[in-house]
Each structure stands twice: as C-alpha cells, then as structure tokens.
Image: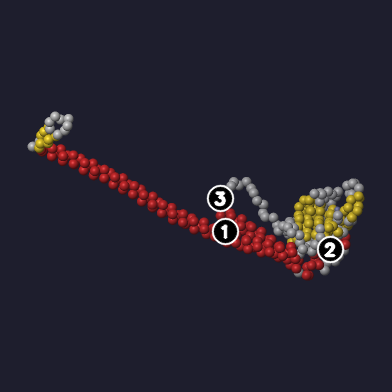
Amino acid sequence: MMNVIIAAKFLRSPKKLSFDEPKVASLALGAVALVLAATFGLGWMIRGADGAALAEMQKLRTELDAQRVALDAARSEAQMEVNAIAARVGELQAQANRLNALGERLTRVGKLKDGEFNFGELPGQGGAEGAGDMPSRELLASLDALEAQFDHSGNQLSVLEALLFDQSLEADAVPAGMPAPGYISSGYGGRNDPFGRGRAHHMGIDIDANTGDPVTAAAGGVVSFSGVRNGYGNVVEIDHGNGYTTLYAHNSQNLVRAGDVVRADQQIARVGSTGRSTGSHLHFEVKLNGRQVNPRQFLQKARG
Ligand SMILES: [Zn+2]
C-alpha cells in the first residue's frame, strides 16, 4: 500500500491518496517501456533513413567518379586537339612573320608602293550552313587550307625576290615586245576620241587583235590588280618592281589574279572589248613611277 499526501493552498486540508502498490508499479513500468520503445523506434527510424541517404550518396559518388573519369578523358582529348591547333597556329604565325619581313624588304629595296601587293585573296567565305560549334576536324582542315595559302604566297614572294634581286632578271623587268598579236591601231597622246567627243589624250596604245587572242606580260613582275575598272572593262595591271607598271585593258577574260608572279611573255588575259571600247582590241599602258609614258619606245626593245 502506498500513501501520497498532497498539500495545496486550494485544499483546505492536505489530502491523502492511497494507491495499490502493484498497480502503480505496473503503470510506471508501462510508462518507462513506452518511452523506451518510442526512443528505440525513433532511433531505428532515423538510423534507417540515414542508411538510405548514405547508400544514395554512395551511388552518387560512384556516378560522379565515373563522370569525372569521362570528363578527364574528354578534356585530355580536347587538349590534344587544342595543342595540335596551337602548334599549327604557331607555324602559321612564323610563316606570317617571315612573309611580312620579306614583304617589307621587297617594298623597301624594290621601291614598291606600300600596300600595292595583294598576295592572293583568302578562299571565299560564307555559305548557308547554320551556326554551331565547329568540329575540330573542320577547323584543322581550314587551318590546312590557310597554311597552303601561306605556302603559295611564300613561293610567290620567293620568286618575286629572285625577280627583283637577280641582276640577270633585271633587264626582263623593263617592258619589251608586243603584249598582243596585231598592229597598233591608235597611238599614244592626242587623238580624236573614238566615241566622237572631240580631242582626247590617249593614255596608252591600242593594238588591234581578235577576241580571244592572247594578252602577254610585257615584262616579268607581280600582278597588282586584276578585275573590272570603270571604262577599262576587265583589266590587268602588273608591277615590275622597278618603277614600271603595265596595264592591259578591255580583256574578254583575265587569267591571273592579284599577287600572281608572272614572267615576261606569259599569257595573262584574252583580248576582248569590255568597258569603253568600240571593238575587240588591247589597250596597253606603261607607267613609270605612276605616270603614263609612251609605250611605243618599249615595244621594239629586245629583251636581254
Ligand atoms: Zn586605248
């Protein structure tokens, strides 16, 4: 038997509660068991959740490791390609430096005007393909093409260098000989305008020739212009590197491009009647230091 005395202000006198002892003990035991069970249960639940999370994390870590390995492989592969491209760019840079130095030297020694040379245009660009990452293979291929272009320019420069510095070729650079088969139909200087607009100064000579006849370089040099020019139609201009330039106009077709090195007597165009022309003929001009001179004085000259 267990007696509990409860004393409180609101009670007039302390109250005595009597419990049956086994009943209390069993109640207390029950309460303790409940608390323990709850604690264990919660603990077990927490530990279980933890375990699942750990397993999940382990799985993620494994996946991450796999991805890291793949990424490393991709990175090293990309790096190899980047290295290949960097090496190629380095080569191109070295070539460009060499070409620039050579070009400067030629411009200085050959007394060529700055910016007069165009060592071949780059291949045409553009197209209908959509934008996107350029496959490295394609990039390398375009670098190869660029390299070939550099090689071409380099070779041209080398030939030009020989042309300008080799004394035996020097005589070759003075215009000589007829640039087209035919007779001189119109001389240099004052003449009646062929279009009936009075007197005009003729800047060159006209050589009567048939459409398609070969137009040949009057001397060795580098093509400084090839294209259409107002009045002249299709025109080729050659810089001979010693102050002389020659011009060939009204061509039906130009066969050389700016930057091409040409030898004396090499065919550069076909006779035509493009531009301001009354019929098939070659209009031929010679300039010395940028001013037109009478070409006739050169046409009879024999080449040395
Ligand atoms: Zn003319």
Residue 136 seen by the camera: yes
Check disc 3 and give the amino acid type. Asp
* Pick the front one: 39 or 15: 15
- Tell me the crowding category of disc 2: few under 14, some 14 to 19, or many 20 or more residues within 10 angstroms, Cα based: many
Q: Which residue is mark 2?
A: 176
* Pick the front one: 33 or 74: 33
Q: Is residue 130 left or right of residue 15?
A: right
Residue 264 seen by the camera: no
- Which quadrant holds the C terminus? bottom right
Q: Which label is found at residue 85? A: 1
The residue shown at (88%, 60%) is 296
Of the numbered discs 2 and 1, the one sitting upstream in the chain is 1
- Which quadrant holds the N terminus? top left
Q: Are marks 2 and 3 in contact (CB under 8 Å)?
A: no
The residue shown at (61%, 55%) is 142
The residue shown at (58%, 57%) is 140
Foreground tag (2 vs 1)? 1
Q: Is residue 58 left or right of residue 127?
A: left
Is the residue marked 3 within 8 Å of ligand 1, measured from its CB? no
